[in-house]
């Protein structure tokens, strides 16, 4: 078997003591950075890049990849414990993760996230190793029309996220789309809704919206409740590890999430975000077993599956990078920079011209994932203890870290004024009983959706049939239509209502 | 900087300060100026970490701070098409402690943005060129076009078909966009439809898949696709051939006269930066750019190390500013 | 008489924001046609859609029979104002207010301001305790953001930093 010979070569490279050390440093740093909202892997990798010039290329990339995973994992920690999604792909983790934390099951949620991530990481690495070459062609099949169709499907599925009224969820998605359009219109380069403020030319940052709506909104709402009603700092922490029954429910969910994430991760742009949203949607649609709490109220499947999806996508997003030199996101773009500095041209030739590096990196991804579990399972106890800190100490700290995180992404005080507005908005949404998940997804996908929609029409000279004559795009739009019909069907409506009443 | 003004204003209005203290303050300030730098220097980058501009700043920092004897910190002020960072340095005091790592896009922005005020690049004090990079004209590997001559004919023919010609760019109003408009002018203005993308990765996919017909982009990002045989290069816009693509002719060799366009990143100071600071910063920058590892890092990335005098950067800025002003006006390219 | 207050006001909010975006797009940007879209096309269409959705939500709220648990209830002005104020004051501390000539006071001052103002939003404010929390946060932030991550944030007030 070629695959195993190749993997053996990879492990040979990655399993040196120094490389293990770099993997460890990377994961540790990444986890710590991920826990701080706003201070993303991007800034950290940029900062450490010059320091890696002196390292051998494999070690440098191993460390950078470790930061990337670590940050992703650390981001879920804050999502679960304090309702702060540090990046787009953890928005759904917040929904059930934070509910679990409020019930004193924060430890279990963190463990589910760690186990799910680890499994998905392993599977994603295998997918990467086995299918990197054939899968690269998939990226070329996705032109503007196909990208648009995929996003329509994603947005319609997002409506399922909300447990309340369908129409409110659709409205929130549209509101998110509109907010996402603030800034530069890619198709003409014109600035829209910026009120001539240069700070708005590149649009509103995700961190600003997420910290305002989730972070500040939640704090204000919690403080408005009487002390006895607050369920944030539940002192009764029931177990750090999932129960046997929870494990049984969790594993199929992890499988589903992993499969989805592995596929969607290959697509440039929105892969990881779409993966976690889609994974959650599927879990929500599946019937509940006896005694299981519905999703949205602290179901462990709602944490395990999206976390698995997002980590699997993180692995497979290396495929377009390594085989085509096409970065799927800004962090990946940074990795290209790192490779070029070490005189490696990513692209179709990297597998043959530099097998030690390619397979070494793949093996190190697996090691990085293992490192994360080893590092994080013991940390769970410490993180959960953080919650037993009195709330009157905790909430000013969260306000502070949100503010620092928002400021430090671009060093702009303007972003701090903006996050204030979104804080008020977040509280308004809670008061009006509107869920924010669909807004965030709309916000992320909005600009990309418009961009691809108009680009497709630009390429077809205004001919709308382009969306239906391409088989892939037509298929995705049909799927979106079917989901919409399903949503509108009375039976499901009734079931949603039941879920709502139970709350 | 702001703070200093307030402090000195305070000093002036306070009668209690003795002449001696005042004198010593003045002398220490005078001393500080000639001995620049006496405290850490900030390099403002108008883009988030990770891009070419950020790289240009970071790659010379280690050697420059060794040369200057003070730490240099990179301050990423992304947003506003790079203008937020430019504006910070434009407003900064001319004391040499806030310098701009400026992308050549500053010579395009004032022409394309009409309602959002953009910084005038000619007001900066040029210090020196950090790196340059040529552009390369590519078509999909599946295209029948083999050289520039065939390209012109192909475009002219296809422009007349109902399908038409689509060319990609990495953004409306970007260097890759205005360069193609300039070439279109040289080809006798055939009908060409502009399809803007956000960055190179997305447009590269559509070019390889044949959804767009042609593209100009930086050699550093495009050369891997050329080497792998997914794109075909027709010419580079730098004065000399690019080491990474030795077989690709320059524009002049391909038969396009006066088509020397480079993407450049320079170190700039605020207006009225004293000459001694410029001189010292320029020589430190040149020392850093002569270092073998720094050069290697720049060349490996596909760019070319800059260097040269402050006047060189000033000239580069001026000629590009004038060139783009004409192109933008002639083709009515506008961004807002 | 509004039957379902929460839904009614949600609907009204959507109508307002959607309508606003639609009007702004219409007046400010070229809409174009389905064949050649201008920058205003997409936001205009979405704005109208949002306004329609909002109107449906609001009308349905009027017809809704159930009234239990659908009242908005009192607005928690104190936490709302104080948390947002804490955030804004942090911005003022870091960036100053150039419009009135207020210089930046730096991260350390900012941390104390945020902690004190935010803590006032709670119902158990104790000066000494908040002071200690601020101190711990200041030390941790200095270590994490300035020493380790080297973020470019002004740390000390202008009169010390210069």
Image: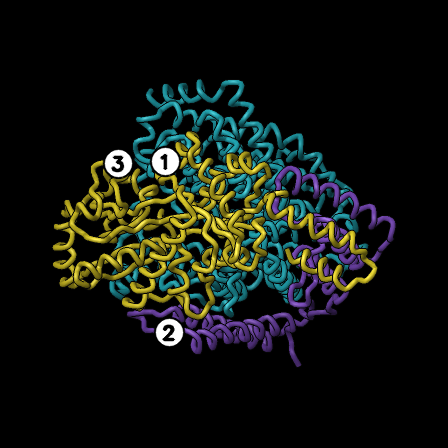
Q: Is residue B4 above or below residue B282?
A: below
Residue receiving disc 2 = C31
Distance, label 2 to label 1, CA atoms, is: 46 Å
Whether label 1 touches label 3, CB < 8 Å: no
Distance, label 3 to label 2, CA atoms, is: 43 Å
Q: Are marks 1 and 3 on the same chain?
A: yes
Nearer the viewer's eye, disc 2 or disc 1? 1
- Kindly tell me whether residue A161 is visible in this rendering: no
- Kindly tell me whether residue B200 is visible in this rendering: yes
Chain in purple colour = C
Count residues near mark 1 (Cα–Cα under 10 Å), then give few for <14, some for 14-19, many for 20+: many
Name the mark on residue B227. Answer: 3
Count residues near mark 2 (Cα–Cα under 10 Å), then give few for <14, some for 14-19, many for 20+: some
Q: Earlier in the sequence, mark 1 or mark 3?
A: 3
Quarter occupied by residue B335 = bottom left
Residue receiving disc 1 = B299
Chain in yellow colour = B
Question: Measuring 15% from the left and 54% from the top, which residue is drawn there?
Answer: B152
Q: Position of residue A416 (x, y in %)?
A: 63, 58
State the residue in front, C151 or B133.
Answer: B133
Q: Colour of chain A?
A: cyan
Question: Measuring 48% from the left and 58% from the top, which residue is drawn there?
Answer: B83
């Amino acid at each position: 078997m070629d695959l195993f010979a190749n993997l053996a070569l990879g492990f040979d490279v990655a399993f040196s003591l120094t490389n293990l050390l770099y993997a460890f440093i990377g994961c540790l740093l990444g986890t710590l950075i991920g826990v701080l909202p706003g201070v993303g892997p991007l800034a950290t990798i940029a900062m450490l890049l010059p320091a890696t010039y002196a390292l051998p290329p494999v070690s440098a990339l191993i460390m950078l990849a470790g930061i990337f995973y670590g940050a992703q994992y650390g981001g879920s920690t804050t999502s679960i414990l304090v309702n702060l999604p540090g990046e787009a792909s953890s928005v759904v983790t917040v929904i059930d993760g934070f509910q679990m934390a409020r019930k004193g099951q924060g430890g279990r949620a963190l463990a589910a996230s760690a186990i799910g991530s680890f499994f998905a990481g392993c599977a994603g690495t295998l997918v990467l190793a086995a299918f990197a070459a054939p899968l690269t062609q998939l990226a070329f099949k996705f032109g503007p029309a196909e990208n648009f169709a995929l996003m329509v499907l994603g947005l319609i599925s997002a409506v399922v996220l909300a447990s309340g009224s369908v129409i409110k969820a659709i409205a929130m998605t549209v509101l998110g789309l509109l907010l996402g359009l603030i800034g530069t219109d890619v198709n003409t380069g014109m600035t829209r809704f910026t009120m001539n403020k240069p700070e708005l030319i590149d649009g509103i940052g995700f961190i600003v919206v997420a910290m305002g709506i989730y972070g500040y909104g939640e704090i204000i709402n919690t403080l408005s409740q009487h002390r006895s009603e607050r369920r944030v700092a539940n002192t009764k922490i029931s177990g750090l590890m999932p129960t046997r029954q929870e494990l049984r429910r969790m594993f199929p969910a992890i499988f589903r999430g992993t499969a989805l994430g592995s596929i969607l991760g290959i697509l440039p742009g929105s892969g990881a975000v779409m993966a976690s949203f889609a994974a959650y949607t599927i879990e929500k649609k599946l019937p509940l077993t006896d005694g299981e709490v519905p999703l949205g109220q602290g179901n462990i499947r709602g944490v395990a599956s999206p976390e698995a999806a997002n980590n699997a996508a993180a692995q497979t997003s290396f495929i377009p990078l390594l085989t085509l030199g096409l970065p799927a996101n800004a962090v990946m773009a940074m990795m290209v920079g790192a490779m070029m500095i070490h005189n490696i041209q990513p692209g179709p030739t990297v597998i043959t011209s530099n097998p030690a590096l390619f397979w070494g990196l793949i093996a190190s991804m697996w090691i990085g994932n293992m490192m994360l579990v080893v590092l994080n399972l013991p940390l769970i106890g410490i993180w959960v203890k953080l919650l037993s800190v009195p709330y009157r100490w905790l909430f000013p700290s969260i306000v502070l870290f949100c503010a620092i995180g928002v400021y430090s992404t671009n060093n702009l005080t303007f972003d701090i004024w903006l996050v204030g507005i979104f804080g008020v908005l977040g509280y308004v949404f809670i008061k009006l009983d509107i869920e924010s998940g669909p807004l965030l997804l709309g916000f992320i996908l909005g600009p990309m959706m418009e961009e691809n929609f108009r680009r497709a029409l630009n390429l077809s000279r205004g001919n709308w049939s382009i969306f239906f004559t391409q088989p892939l795009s037509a298929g995705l739009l049909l799927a979106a239509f079917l989901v919409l019909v399903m949503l509108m069907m009375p039976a499901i409506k009734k079931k949603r209502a039941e879920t709502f009443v139970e709350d | 900087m702001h703070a200093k003004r307030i402090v000195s204003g305070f000093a002036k209005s306070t009668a209690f300060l003795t002449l001696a203290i005042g004198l010593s303050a003045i002398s220490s300030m005078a001393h500080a100026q000639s001995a620049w730098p006496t405290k850490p220097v900030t390099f403002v980058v108008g883009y988030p970490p990770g891009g070419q501009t950020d790289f240009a700043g970071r790659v010379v920092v280690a050697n420059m701070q060794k040369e200057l004897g003070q730490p240099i910190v990179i301050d990423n002020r992304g947003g506003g098409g790079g203008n937020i960072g430019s504006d910070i340095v434009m407003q900064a005091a001319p004391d040499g402690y806030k310098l701009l790592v400026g992308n050549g896009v500053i010579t395009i922005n004032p022409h394309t943005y009409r309602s959002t005020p953009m910084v005038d690049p000619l007001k900066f004090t040029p210090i020196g060129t950090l790196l340059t990079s040529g552009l390369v004209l590519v078509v999909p590997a599946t295209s029948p076009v083999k050289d520039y001559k065939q390209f012109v004919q192909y475009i002219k023919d296809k422009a007349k078909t109902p399908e038409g010609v689509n060319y990609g760019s990495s953004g409306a109003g970007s260097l890759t966009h205005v360069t193609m408009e300039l070439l279109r002018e040289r080809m006798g203005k055939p009908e060409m439809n502009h399809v803007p993308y956000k960055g190179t990765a997305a447009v590269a996919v559509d070019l390889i898949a044949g959804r767009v017909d042609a593209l100009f982009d930086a050699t550093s990002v495009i050369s891997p696709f050329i080497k792998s045989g997914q794109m075909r290069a027709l010419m580079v816009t730098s004065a000399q051939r690019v080491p990474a693509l030795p077989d690709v002719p320059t524009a002049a060799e391909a038969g396009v006269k006066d088509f020397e366009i480079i993407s450049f990143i320079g170190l700039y100071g605020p207006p009225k930066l004293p000459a001694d600071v410029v001189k010292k910063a320029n020589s430190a920058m040149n020392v850093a750019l002569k270092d073998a590892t720094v050069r290697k890092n720049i060349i490996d990335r596909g760019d070319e190390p800059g260097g040269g005098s402050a006047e060189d950067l000033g000239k580069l800025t001026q000629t590009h500013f004038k060139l783009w002003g004409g192109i933008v006006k002639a083709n009515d390219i506008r961004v807002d | 008489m509004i039957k379902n207050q929460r839904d009614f006001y949600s609907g009204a909010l959507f109508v307002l924001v959607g309508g606003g975006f639609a009007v702004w797009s219409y007046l400010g940007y070229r809409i174009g046609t389905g064949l050649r879209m201008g920058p205003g096309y997409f936001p205009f269409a979405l704005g109208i859609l949002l306004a329609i959705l909002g109107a449906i939500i609001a009308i349905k709220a009027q017809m809704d029979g159930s009234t239990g648990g659908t009242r908005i209830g009192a607005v928690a002005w104190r936490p709302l104002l104080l948390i947002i104020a804490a955030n804004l004051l942090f911005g003022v501390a870091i960036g100053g207010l150039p419009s009135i000539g207020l210089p930046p006071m730096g991260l350390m001052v900012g941390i104390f301001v945020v902690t004190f103002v935010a803590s006032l939003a709670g119902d158990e404010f104790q000066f000494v305790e908040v002071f200690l929390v601020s101190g711990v946060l200041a030390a941790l932030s200095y270590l994490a953001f300035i020493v380790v991550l080297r973020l470019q944030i002004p740390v000390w007030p202008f009169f010390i930093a210069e």
